Each structure stands twice: as structure tokens, then as C-alpha cells.
Amino acid sequence: MANGAPARTVHRQALAALGPGLAAGGFEHLQSVPIAAWARPAGEQFIVGWVQPSRHPDSFGWYGTKFTINFRRGAKPAVAVNGPAVRFCRLLDDDGREQVRAVQNAIIRRIPPPPAHVTSLLAGSTLDWYLSQGREVTTPYSPSDDVWFRHRDAHDLADWFGLLPALLPATLNQLRRKLG
């Protein structure tokens, strides 16, 4: 069963897919870290953006894992900088969030039925939560939702890294309004 692409694959593909759009927005790749991370000056501070894979993939290999994209303003061009932050999807308009939901649901629809050898071990709220990972997102995402990009395999990553660069220009415009 698939358990999501390894974090290094997510970072490598993010660098290739998002790097050109971020560079066009004034960001430079942070060579000092082994992840997909970029920074640009914002007055006397910096806006730092990075891809954050989940630290908690599905240990049973059914629903996969996820990643998100963070932006933060701080005193230095580093991922661990302190300051105000915002995630990618919170910068999207309604149409952008709907495009994300469409890809999210396409990925969820490709998940096979849950493994009986796992579901037979679970009960109550744990089973309910586990099964919910295979349910489509039925309501539009709101600007305050904490959206993570689900994936199980290379096909799913290709879907995300096909969509996210197209959403990047509007996202960066909104980022300038929010963080500078």
C-alpha cells in the first residue's frame, strides 16, 4: 500500500515546481537547509516560505500523508524564524480554495477501501477518525481552514505540483498584503 512520497521527494518536486514562481516573486532558495525553503527581503526583515511534510503519515499505509506550505515574517532568512505566519491556502480566494478542494477530493477518491485487517483492530472514535480519512471534503474550505495537501503516491504529487504553481501568483500578492 502507498504511504505517501518520502519527504525528500516532496521537497525535490516542490523546488522544481514552485521555485520559478517564487523566484519571480523575489524569493531566493535557502541553500543552507536541505528542504524546499525560500526567503525574500521585506524591509529590514524577511519573508520565509517552506514546504512542511507531515510528521505523522498513516502507519498502516492506507490514506497516505500530507504536506503544507508555510510563510513567516522574521528578522532573518531562516525557517525557524519567529514572527507572524500564514499558510498557503489561507492566502487563496474562494476560487483557489475550490481548486484545491477539487484536487484533494480527486486524491481521496483514488484511495482504495480501508484495509479490513486494520479496521478490525479499531473501535469507536478511533475507527471513525480513521475512516474519515477516506471521505471527500463536502463543504468548501473557508479562509480559516488549515488545509494540508494529501498524497499517497507520485500521481498525487503530480496533481498538486500541477495546480500549486498556477495559484502561486495570486497567493504571493495576498502574502504581500498580509506579511509585507
Image (cartoon, helix red, strand yellow):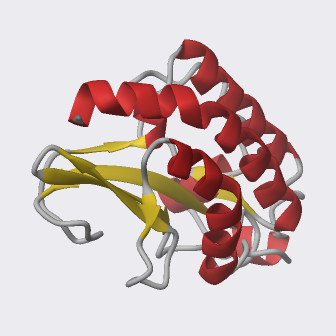
Q: Please provide percent x and percent y for residue 25.
A: 47, 41
Instruction: Please tell me which residue is depicted at 52% across the width and 61% down the height of the picture.
Output: 126
Depth check: give the residue in front, 164 or 1. Answer: 164
From the viewer's perspective, is 74 left or right of 176? left
Residue 64 placement: quadrant? bottom right
Q: Nearer the viewer, residue 76 or 3?
A: 76
Question: Residue 140 appears in which quarter of the rendering?
Answer: top right
Dividing the image into 4 quarters, which one contains the N terminus?
A: bottom right
Tag count:
0
Q: Position of residue 70 (x, y in %)?
A: 39, 53
Residue 84 vertical position relative to residue 7 in the rendered view, above or below:
above
Left or right relative to 64: residue 54: left
- The residue sitting at the top extreme is 94
Question: Which residue occupies 80% across, 78% down?
Answer: 117
Q: The C terminus appears in which quarter of the rendering?
A: top left
Q: Residue at x 15, y 56 (%)?
A: 74
Up/down of 5 relative to 172, above or below: below
Q: Is residue 59 visible?
A: no
* 141 lies above or below 47: above
Foreground of the two, 118 or 137: 137
Does any portion of residue 11 appear in the rendered image? yes
Image location of residue 75, percent across then percent down:
10, 60
Q: Is residue 42 left or right of residue 2?
A: left
User: Residue 177, how many percent across, how many down?
Assistant: 28, 24
